[in-house]
Each structure stands twice: as structure tokens, then as C-alpha cells.
Amino acid sequence: MTETQDTQTSESVEELKSAAVAALNSADSSEKLEAWRVEFMGRKGRLTSLLRGLGSFAIEDRKIVGAAANRLRGELESLYEDRESDSKSSQAPVGSIDITLPGRKPALGGLHPSTQMIREITQAFNEMGFQTIEGPEVELEKYNFDMLNIPADHPARDQWDTIWVDSDTHDDVLLRTHTSPMQARVMEENDPPIRVVVPGKCYRYESTDATHEWHFNQVEGLAVDEGITLADLKGTLYEFARRVFGANRKVRFRCDYFPFVEPGVDMSIDWNGGWMEIMGAGMVHPKVLENAGYDSSKYTGFAFGMGPERISMLRNEITDIRHFFSNDLRFLTQF
């Protein structure tokens, strides 16, 4: 091939490159990109036709033109892949935001209704000088029963259907049946004065119905100091009722039995023309104080416990406690 022929062949490769790049830059849709690929890179495309025509060239010219054409193929393939990637990223995927649609309020999460009520209850006592603490849900029999004046042969144990836990190291591990074990733990680790509230989950092996669940929350309270009397207990719980149920709320205390208090009471509030019990309470039993190493002739205290779900049921006119744990968004999103 003459020098003139070689120049013309090289220019044909350059012309093809210029035409391909110009066409690719103007391809502004996936359909046009595909048409470009077929025209220039397809089996019958212009670049393929050029490569197939190399057989008519002399060997030296074939090497020069073939190398230039192969370089062009690599360049065009790279340019095509970049444009194809840009085209896909610019297309909104399914489920993405369509800016042409009217605005919609995004779905927001929120605190569980039990959590909301626990925070309101603990806040009421925090403002009266009580500290909020938490304790283990997997407990030892020692703290769940023994130190609370409920020994192994005590009939009060029949009040709880306990869920026992298999353990390689202990034979007395259980899921706590109430938050009262923290009374013993707090007194065991601290000297008076003590004022704490203890929110947490409890577990009992029992049938469920509209007013009973096998797992539920409790809020325990404990105050121990010199000179604490039943009047302090009544005044504290009365103030709590006013903060949670309204400033004009009336309360009533009646004698009740709990093995870890003496005397024991239940507190009711006036509700829809009658009285509704909302918690149990009482003066800490002297044996419970002594089990923790306190001098019961010097220190006295009071304790109380309530179910935040039950209080929420009253406040919000909920008729079934199982709604709190069913994970039904129709219920949960109302709070």
C-alpha cells in the first residue's frame, strides 16, 4: 500500500471514531444508546465491518489498521459503559420519590404506650425525690422470694406461677415474678436514706385474658429512712394520683396482705362513680429490713407496686391488656 493509501485508511478509522463519539454524546435515552451500540458495535456494525475488511489489505497495512481499530473498539466500549451507567443512575428506581406527586407526610416512629406510661409514672416520683433504677429480669430465688419474707414453705408463693430457668451453675434461677426483688438488692448495697422507683418487665406462667398477661411491666417503689410512717406513704401516693389522674382525684386506702409489707394496703382512685384499685403498697416488713442488714428498730420504710399497662388502660379506655403486646400498628399508632 502506498503512503497515500495508508493515510486514507488511518483517516477512515479516525472518521469512524469521530462519528461514533458524536452519535454517543447525542444519545439521551436508553433506546438511543441501544441503537448506537447496534450501529457501531453490533455484529453488522460499522466498526465490525471495518475489521472484517482488513483481509483485503497488505500485511503491513493490516497490522497498522487492525491495531488502530482494536484501540477504537476498547475506547468505544468504555465510553458506552460509562454512558449506560449514567443513564441507569439517572432513572428513578421503583419506589423512589416522585417529585411530581403531591407531598405526603412521612411515617414516623414513636415510643411504645407502655414506655410512655412508665416514663410518666417515674417522672412523677422523680419530682418527689425518687431515683429511677433498673434490675435484672433473670433473678435468683433468694431475691425474688427469700429476702422478701417468702420462704420456701410460705403459702404466699402460691400467688405466683413462676417460670424457672435451666442453669448449669444454679438450681434457683427464674424469670422474676415482680420487681420487688430490687427492694432487697437496693437495701443490700446501700445505706439509708433510700428513695427509688424501679420500672421493669415481669413474667408469670399463667393464662392470658383481657386483664391478664404472662409478661407485663411493673413499677416498684421503695423509701427507707428514720421516722418514715404510713402517713408518708399515703401522702406520696396521693400526690402521685393527683399528678397522673388529675389534681381533683380522690384516693382510698384499704387493708391488704403482701408478705413483704406490714401493714399492707391497696390504693384505689375514684373512677366513673366507683373505686378502682391501681396499686398495692405498705410499710416494709421488719424481716425484710433485717434480711438486708438494717436495724428495724431504727429504720422504717414503705414500698408500693403498680402495673403501668393497667393505668394506661384506665387513662385511655383500653379494654384488653393484650393489645399492648400484639404489635398491631392500628393500636400502637394511636398514642
Image (spheres, grey):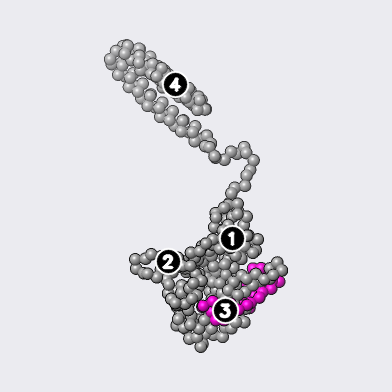
In terms of sequence position, does the residue under pointer 2 or pointer 3 come before the other?
Answer: 2
Seen from the viewer's position, the closer of residues 87 and 329 is 329
- Distance from the alpha carbon under mark 2 to that under mark 1: 25 Å
* Element assignment for label 3: strand
Q: Earlier in the sequence, mark 4 or mark 2?
A: 4
Give the labeled residue for mark 4: 38
Q: Which residue is mark 3?
A: 264
Q: Residue at x 62, y 55 (%)?
A: 334
Q: Residue furthest left?
A: 59
In the image, what residue occupies the spot 66% across and 68% down?
A: 245
Label 4 to label 1: alpha-carbon separation: 70 Å
Q: For numbered disc 1, what is the local secondary structure?
A: loop
Separation (CA) of disc 4 from disc 3:
90 Å
Question: Of label 4 and label 3, which has the lower sequence position?
Answer: 4
Residue 221 to residue 308: above or below? below
Q: Give the foreground label among 4 and 2.
A: 2
Foreground of the two, 220 or 47: 220
When asked about the image quadrant of residue 146, the answer is bottom left
Q: Which mark is residue 164?
A: 2
Label 4 Cα crowd, 10 Å radius (few <14 / some 14-19 / many 20+): some
Q: Between disc 1 and disc 3, whose residue precedes?
A: 1
Q: In the rendered structure, which segment of residues is drawn in magenta?
A: 235-263
Question: Which badge, 4 or 1, comes first in the chain's sequence?
Answer: 4
Residue highlighted by disc 1: 210
